[in-house]
Image: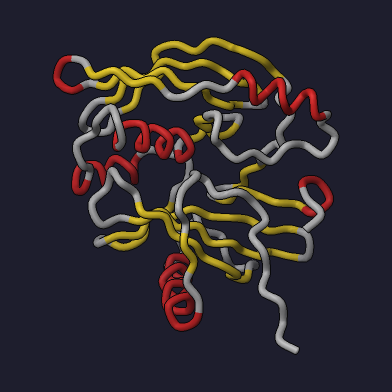
Amino acid sequence: MPEALPSWVLEPLLPGDWFEVGGILQRDFFARVSRLKSANDQSMPLEQGRLEKVRFLELSFFKEWLLCEVQVNFEPGLKGLVSLLYGPHGLIVVNGKSQGIHTINRLSLKPLDAAGTGPAYLRFFCSAIRGEKGRFQIVEPESPFSFHPDSSESDCNEFRQRLEPVKVNTGMDSVLSVTALSIYDGGLYRCKFEIQQNGTVMMLEDEELCIDIPLCSEEFQGPFRIWKKNENSSK
């Protein structure tokens, strides 16, 4: 009887139409990822892990670049997802810092508009960049969530009722002014951003709406989003 395929242990870094590959395409991609390891890239500590799955997402704001996530099994009950950008110039690790993103911006960033590419870029940028307490995840009414198992239905409903869509206005020099809700360090905030056409993002204001939101917390180790069986899931 064939071995059951592993399931994804965490929601994707971004919502969207992700697709998976298997067989020879998966093996070829894993070989590319492993070369980051063999090149002694300190941001990719894969030596103790086994690559399990890979998924890809087309990005509307970059020319010829995909966002991909690789699931790594480190040991029983401990897995991690590493996000990478995959394009004409190879693989770039999404490691919580902005340097790699701005390198791609100079090469492949499309015009950022208020209706599509601008909000999409902000969702990506805020999930790719991390502060001391994690990423600045943009959330909207249709966003998928992993609610904490101890959360009551009323807590979950109250949280969802606070959500609102992203609002974007275009100013001089096509600078985008954006109001969006963001999750950071277990709190929900209403934030005002400014996005330049070169991909520079500035957070101008943030207003705390609530703390101790009823969602599973995230843990990062280096570039990995970490899943631990005994804390986050029964998978």
Q: Which residue is painted at 68% across and 58% down in the image?
A: 79
Q: Viewed as shown, does residue 164 lie left or right of 179?
A: right
Task: Return the x and y of residue 23 as percentages of the image width and height.
Answer: 49, 82
- Furthest residue in direction left, as rendered: 173
| Display coloring | secondary structure
Say whether residue 172 is visible.
yes
x%, y% of residue 219?
66, 42
Position above or below: 112 against 19: above
The quarter holding residue 128 reads: top left
Which x, y percent locates residue 208?
A: 59, 12
Instruction: In the rendered view, tell whether residue 58 sits above or below residue 7.
Output: above
Image quadrant occupied by the C terminus: bottom right
Identify the residue at horizontal 55%, vertical 29% (top origin).
Answer: 141
The N terminus: image quadrant: bottom right
Q: Position of residue 15 (x, y in %)?
A: 50, 44
> Is residue 131 in view from this perspective?
no
Q: Is residue 168 left or right of residue 235?
A: left
Seen from this angle, which residue lies furthest bottom? 1
Q: How many marks?
A: 0
Residue 87: quadrant of the picture: bottom left
Q: Residue at x 36, y 56 (%)?
A: 66
Q: Nearer the viewer, residue 86 or 131?
A: 86
> Looking at the rendering, which quadrant does residue 41 occupy?
bottom left
